[in-house]
Each structure stands twice: as C-alpha cells, then as structure tokens.
Amino acid sequence: MSDETYMKLALEYAPKGCGWVDPNPMVGAVVVKDGRVIGAGYHRKYGGAHAERNALASCTEPPQGATLYVTLEPCCHYGKTPPCTEAILESGIRRVAVGSVDPNPLVAGKGIRFLRRHGIEVTEGVLREECTALNEVFFHFIRTGTPYVVMKYAMTMDGKIATRAGRSKWIAGEAARRRVQEDRHRYAGVMVGVGTVLADDPLLTCRLPGGKNPVRILCDSRLRTPPEARVVRTAGEVPTILATCSPDEARARPYREAKCEVLTLPAKDGRVDLRALMAALGKKGIDSVLLEGGGTLNWSALTSGIVNKVQAYVAPKLFGGTGAKSPVEGDGVADPERAFRLAPPRVTRLVDDLLLESEVFPCSRES
C-alpha cells in the first residue's frame, strides 16, 4: 500500500480530537510494519499525550524498523508533554512520513531536522494539502495570535435570515442545526451581538450529548444586555465574556457579580473595536470563534477584516418582504467591484438544505 493510503488513515484518526485539543492542532498517527498497521492514535485532549506517543503506546508488536505516518511534524520541544521526536527515536522507528510542517516557531522544521540528524529517514509532504486543511484554525492562530473567525448564518433562497416580523425559528432543518451544534463543539468561542441577545435570548451552548460548550462572547458596546438574559444567568456554568467600550463600572457590576468577564475595549465608530477584541481573545488562548450574529455585527466583522470563512446554510424557502433582514446589512458596498470576494464554495448537502463554505479573500472595501 502507498504512503498516501496510510496517511489517509492517520487523517481519519486526527479529527477524533476535534473540540478537545485547542489551541493545539488535531493530529493523527499510524505505525506500519511489514505492510501491516500495528498501532494508531491521535491527540485526544489539550495537555495530554500527542498522537505519536499514543500510536506507539498502542502497538501490538515492537515498532523497531517500522514507519510512522503522522499528519503534522513531530514536536521537538518540551511543553505540556516531552518531545515526540525523543519517543520516536527511542522506539526504533526507521522512517517517518509527515503530512505538513508545523508552523509553530518552536518546531517549524526542527523536528524533521532532529530526526534526520539521528539517522531516521523522513518523507515530507504526504497529502500536504489535506493535512494542512485539517488544521486551518491552528495554522492561522499560531501565525497571527488571533482567533480564526467563521461567520455563520442560515438564510432562505431569497436571502432572508428572518421574516418581516423578525421570526427565524427555524429557517434550516434538523440536519443543518445539528451541524451548527457540531461547530459549537469544534470552535473555542461563539460570538453574537447584543441585538441577538435582545431578540432571541439564546443560550449559545453546545447541545450535543457529551459536547464541549464554547466560550460565549457578547459584543455589547453600551452594556444593554439584560441581567436576566440566559447567557448572564448561566455565566457561572459556561464561561461568558461581555465585550464593551462603556467605561461605566456601575453598569458592569451586575454582570461581574453574575460571573461574566467584562472586557472594556477601545471604540471604533461608536462600537467595540473588533480587531482589538480578537487580539484580547487571542491572548486568552481562544483560537477560533463561530460568529452567529445578525446583519449589523456581520457587516462590522467583514469591514474590520476579522472574518476568515463564511458558512451560509441555504434553505429551500422564500420569505420575501422589503423589511425582512438579510445576513449582512450595514452600509453595503456602492460598487460591485468593491465586493468582499470569497473563494469558490465547498458545497455540502444536509437533507433539504445546502451548506456553502468559502474562505474570505483580502479585498478592497468600503468602511
């Protein structure tokens, strides 16, 4: 069997750590000896053993002379765990096939060079594109220090996210709603604006059995969130951040008493500076944010340049209505040439609905 075949198997293991390893990457590893898979593993949880060590520990026979397939370059530094390169060396592995190079400056090719210096054959770039795509969040976070932001919304085929009366439950079907819950488990934070809190009083938790709740981030420039809102009342159970540019400590006090963290940030055009917010979240180790806001927050996020990917759930329905809300509002662009450009979408069928996912290209824009 080929290197690509075994790396595909490693890629099947890696996502098993989804939602539990951030801000670390998802990594899978497979040990192959004489054409047989004798061990496999993945990075299970942040602070726990890495994929390589788990794969070696699972081997059904001694791994001396075997090949290790790993989706990301093995680490060569001491962090929460000892270097994986040392475990590989001690195991007697003869060859290592690597998917993508780790962009972390603590690694960044050093792991590969260490292995080669110690006589281990290394093959680089096996299914590089697939291995890199697996960790788009990690690669962005390690390079920028700010969260990877996914702007998500559900809309009808005429581009409405609510009826003219403001009702939006439910635009998309059950399969699409489950996918959203999977993403709440996957990404470290979920963010909405105060308008969404006032309109829907959402809980913003992950409703999957055994799932992980994201950190809830509320953009509330003037601290208008009702203290009785569900996100405030449950802040002692689920980490909750209120991002504001209001200096009024008396207004902030009820939220702090409810166990919310209140972040006072600079203002931009009278609202929370979203780039400053992303920098603050990055310092807290929040590597990714699922943006579930309305049209106003979505426009602000786009114009501030923080959005990395757009997820549009499209339902085969028509709402109509001149006053019915759309996914992106604000001023809008005046000229089609100044549109926010997106990469060709990846399309996923979710029973009756479609999920369109596109990366955001840097582009000229109106602010």
Image (tube, helix red, strand yellow):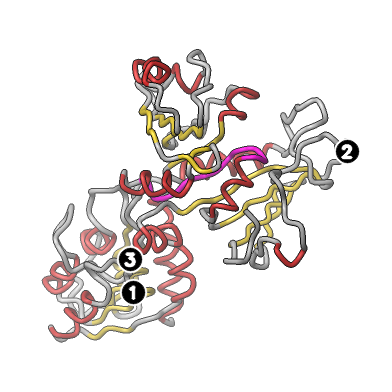
Is 45 above or below relative to 13? above
Measured Cα–Cα span from mark 2 to mark 3: 51 Å
Q: SS class of the residue under badge 1? A: loop
Residue 320, numbered circle: 2
Q: Which residue is mark 3?
A: 29
Query: In the image, is 202 to the left or to the right of 351?
Result: left
Residue 131 lies in the magenta-colored region: no
Q: Which residue is mark 1?
A: 101
Residue 33, numbered circle: none
Among numbered discs 3 and 1, the one appearing first in the sequence: 3
Rendered-image quadrant of the N terminus: bottom left
Q: In the image, which is nearer the foreground, mark 1 or mark 2? A: 2
Residue 297 picture location, percent across and down: 60, 41
Q: SS class of the residue under badge 2? A: loop
* Residue at (39, 53) in percent of width and height: 146
Residue type for callout 2: Gly
Is 241 above or below relative to 69? above
Among numbered discs 1 and 2, the one appearing first in the sequence: 1
Measured Cα–Cα span from mark 1 to mark 2: 49 Å
Residue 345 picture location, percent across and down: 67, 63
Comparing 331 with 348, the one in front is 331
Query: In the image, is 179 to the left or to the right of 335?
Result: left
Q: SS class of the residue under badge 3? A: strand
Comparing 357 with 347, the one in front is 357
Residue 287 lies in the magenta-colored region: yes
Query: In the image, is 211 to the left or to the right of 323?
Result: left
The magenta segment is 286-296
Quadrant of the rendered structure where residue 78 is?
bottom left
Query: In the image, is 208 to the left or to the right of 18?
Result: right
